[in-house]
Amino acid sequence: MGCLDKIQSPSDLRGLDEAELSELCAEIRRFLVDSVSRSGGHLASNLGAVELTLAIHRVYDTARDRLVFDVGHQCYTHKLLTGRREGFEHFREYGGMSGFPKPSESAHDAFVAGHASNSVSVALGMARARTALGADYDVAAVIGDGALGGGLAFEGLSDAGHSGEPLVIILNDNGMSINRNVGGTADMLDRMRTRPEYINFKRWYRSVFAPHVPGLYRFTHQAKRWIKERVIPENVFDDLGFEYIGPMDGHDIHKIETALRWAREQKKPCLVHVVTRKGHGYAPAEQRPESFHGVGPFDPRTGEPLNAEEDYSAVFGRELTKLAAEDGRVAAITAAMSEGTGLDGFRQAFPKRFFDVGIAEGHACAMAGGMAAQGMIPVFAVYSTFLQRAYDMLIHDVALMHLHTVFAVDRAGIVGKDGQTHQGAFDVAYLTSVPHMTVYAPASFAELASMLRRAVLEDEGPVAVRYPRGGEGDYAADHSAAPCAVLREGSDVTVAAYGAETACALAAAELLEKQGVSVEIVKISRLAPLDIEPVAASVKKTGALVVPEDVCEAGGMGEQILAGLALKGAAPSKARLVNLGDGILPNGAPDELRRVTGLDAEGIARAVRETLDGKDQT
Amino acid sequence: MGCLDKIQSPSDLRGLDEAELSELCAEIRRFLVDSVSRSGGHLASNLGAVELTLAIHRVYDTARDRLVFDVGHQCYTHKLLTGRREGFEHFREYGGMSGFPKPSESAHDAFVAGHASNSVSVALGMARARTALGADYDVAAVIGDGALGGGLAFEGLSDAGHSGEPLVIILNDNGMSINRNVGGTADMLDRMRTRPEYINFKRWYRSVFAPHVPGLYRFTHQAKRWIKERVIPENVFDDLGFEYIGPMDGHDIHKIETALRWAREQKKPCLVHVVTRKGHGYAPAEQRPESFHGVGPFDPRTGEPLNAEEDYSAVFGRELTKLAAEDGRVAAITAAMSEGTGLDGFRQAFPKRFFDVGIAEGHACAMAGGMAAQGMIPVFAVYSTFLQRAYDMLIHDVALMHLHTVFAVDRAGIVGKDGQTHQGAFDVAYLTSVPHMTVYAPASFAELASMLRRAVLEDEGPVAVRYPRGGEGDYAADHSAAPCAVLREGSDVTVAAYGAETACALAAAELLEKQGVSVEIVKISRLAPLDIEPVAASVKKTGALVVPEDVCEAGGMGEQILAGLALKGAAPSKARLVNLGDGILPNGAPDELRRVTGLDAEGIARAVRETLDGKDQT
């Protein structure tokens, strides 16, 4: 029986001695590598945070205290320690445990996580609620150095430092976000890591004065502050009002524990700076941490991925590199996702036209606006869910001046195992509300290449090309020449489809043909501006319309098409929308999610039959 | 003939001597007070930036160099100096000059402005484009200390400092954003303002070594850096990679000029810290700068406003204060808009439950999520256009956990004279796409009070109450009990209206009645979830539908209603949408804008007649 078997709840951690803790860490790492090699998930960040997580749980009672994770992909050890070991059996599958913190899963998960840089704000809100309501619990947030560079974190730190609220921010600094960290914030942390004297001075000073001569401590505290401000380099955390302690070894449980207890006792905003190593304890991940950030199943002995089919991201990166070779104005921008968005090749080929701005989608978008205003053709490659951060900049810094800026919107639609915080469920709604934005939805690699070329070299104003995560489906043709056109003729019902749903609609039509139902498929290649004529003509013939799409219903193409038809007095007599409804979709394999949402071939076929049978949608 | 008459273009500034510059500044101030007292607009910030603007124009050629304003309400002197004096005659009126930088108005306006904190990102994009394309011009940005606290500015600074790009950021620090500035960033700047020794040391050092012994300068530069890092407190700008100079008197043209020339010559990212006084030179604005941020017409001798009718913001603030007295969980949040959103009374009544987070809408929203998770009832009062910044946080940090958080969305719909960056044209689209968000649209003060009470004390999950800028129209009733109901019976056509359009629709119905057209008005009080049955029943009777709304068409209620009717097989045979189209609407008085967009009573009446005549909308 290993150490891990003895941990039924976090309180069991507190009785362990040094040797047991060490063995427990090793065992957790073996468990994580083994588990993630089968399920896929986030590995390097979790391996780096094992000791930190143990230290946190030895100090805080997370069932009562509130522990807020930032991004949250580093929560696996936390889940293991809070009674969810069995959850790793169906980890990230549909109906199984989420790979991110989820309050509905456990009282130990204080808040949802998935997007970056929100944890300080959330924790401050919790601390303020505690104080206002007279409650008694501690609040702590764990934020990585990558997420710290996001503007939202700065807003939170600025308010929190000034607030005086008892609150501990734990900076888990591994020098990486997903790729090697970039920007002035990263440089600043680099320098802080090489300045041990500050904390040593503080430590010495505190250990000598604080416990023994509290009165003198208070008196000298003012003197010290005077000296410190003049002698010791302050950092931005001091500047913003935090008590800062660090940097310290993030793999030394006792050091972290001591610092956390000290910080908690200050009863004011404190920042504990912990330096960890991403991938710690597993050689392949230590050597190539960026490749072990988010992974599919891999061989645990070698770290080699088990399959590596070509995906939309790779095609995008290759095609954009070609376009950059043709036109010197083309630039690529990523927000810390060079590898994920397929831009590593571009970076190597055109380093001077490649810009990784860190986790800062709003800045990326506004900067792209500035570049476009001065004659560049910036292409910002970004996941659909993260571009939500830049909604205001899309309107204000790009669309108001009709600047030619291209958005390569990756992971649009159903994304899968990362769950509710990562699905690209809202981009059709928010992109089509941006003034005069052209929006393309390729349904194959070939269409992505064609549309990207048109977006970059031919179109004007803001253009988005949204494409799904993963590989191509059964549809590999290129019908992108027309913005909207009949892809398959039929007489009983019109199915208007785009993107990943194109292949599903075609498969549904095959199924229905065998059942004697003749389906006409209108393929929409350009979502905005929408050319509704082909849909209207088809609906006039068939009288019935089904619109499947893997995004939320509000503001989706289904509503837009129905409204457009109604305005023309051409509304179908029977209609049905198949989509993600509210847009909240849990973790699960994409195929499984497509099945349960009725967006696979069988689901579309079923919707068509029910529509023709006149069944009410609701 | 005054000094100002001699300035035909910025180049005329360069020949002026000290006395002439001083007289010019005084003359500009008189002009601004006189002009804004008639037109309304932004005053205090412009009075504070006169010398700064002159210094900038003596150093940069803004027709060629790129000068990016942040927010941009401080651009009046810039407009005066760049050949737009006549523009102040119809300033901020429909068809007249905008109160914000606008590239379509002048080559001297490099980029749109209106929202805060984007200027560093935009300027960096321009600088990078210049370098990548081998062009030759300088880039500078002017950002206020309030906007500096926004996370977007931090993202920009972090990237810019690291970039090495020649770029000058001018920090116009008046210790205010709109109200007195708050948060850790403000504290930090406060301390920086009291530390003149740093710049003095730098100055002395530079003046002694740089011009005379360049080799020694380079050598000692490294030594100096070593010493500086250990002896002189660094600030966050140094940390992020900027060359920092300041703080300096922002009303001393020559000091600013010298600093700007020095910064430009560095050929790297520089930050020039200038301390100005908001309202400088006009006693009423110096004494109450927050009251002279954005003003309506006033008496220039006393500074007293010419009219002060009660508005929605005041009603909101009063009602929320009542609710807070009833329930100790109610808290109010503002992003630097305490006065504008009507919260000054709340702040005085419940200071411990009032949170001004500075210009940080994303943080405000995520923090509200944290508060709600721990049992508070946070109410974030924010302008519609600025809440765009928090779209991602609305989804991720509020809606995913269905947290009971209230958004008091002020300035929804047509806002008026502030123009395209300030209209609340997108909130219906983006709010109704947020999962399970309840959205109310009061059409009178009484309805605002009823809906706010319901939103705060009765509803669950996220709730938005969106209301217009300014006073009540002719409709003052309260029909908010039903989410959607017939307000006026008729037989020829259905007009579905909400919010400010309710009064216009009623007036249109009166007009049409005289012309023999019988209008049924269905009033929508709750936009989401939408109760479409009353509309369907009415349309079934009339067969025709017109939906007027002062927001963009995409994702608006018009599309949603038509889609909902079509899904029920209840589409009208004739339909028309009247709205802001793409959502881009220039400056102008609200009544004028309502007229030109066809959203006033006459416009709705015309749309109804054309619909009944079967004229095509397009």
Image (spheres, coloured by chain):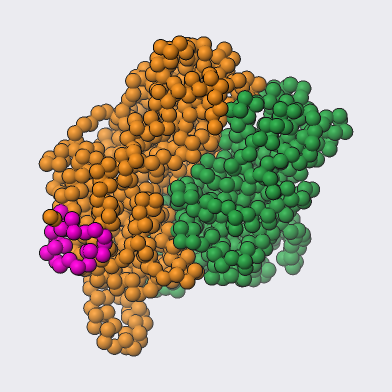
Chain colours: A green, B orange
Residue at x 58% of width, y 53% of height: A459
Residue at the farthest right position? A514
Give the left or right position of residue A467, taking residue B322 as reference: right
Residue A557 image position (x, y, % from top left): 62, 37
Front residue (pair A350, B576): B576
Quarter holding the C terminus of chain B is top right
Residue B258 image position (x, y, % from top left): 24, 71
Q: Quadrant of residue A210?
A: bottom left
Quarter holding the N terminus of chain B is bottom left
Give the left or right position of residue A305, taking residue B500 as reference: right
Residue A555 image position (x, y, % from top left): 57, 36
Say if residue B326 shows up in the picture.
no
Which stretch did the figure color magenta? B3-27
Magenta-highlighted stretch: main secondary structure?
Answer: helix
How many labels, in total?
A: 0
Give the left or right position of residue B485, taking residue B20 as reference: right
Front residue (pair A550, A433): A433
Residue at x 19% of width, y 68% of height: B15
Front residue (pair B340, B553): B553
Question: In the figure, B388 relative to A16: above or below?
Answer: above
Residue at x 73% of width, y 43% of height: A502
Residue B226 image position (x, y, % from top left): 36, 79
Front residue (pair A275, B22): B22
In the rendered image, residue B16 lying in the magenta stretch gets the answer yes
Q: Quadrant of residue B152?
A: bottom left
Give the left or right position of residue A77, taking residue A307 as reference: left
Question: In the figure, A411 relative to A595: above or below?
Answer: below
Residue at x 15% of width, y 45% of height: B284
In the rendered image, residue A383 lying in the magenta stretch gets the answer no
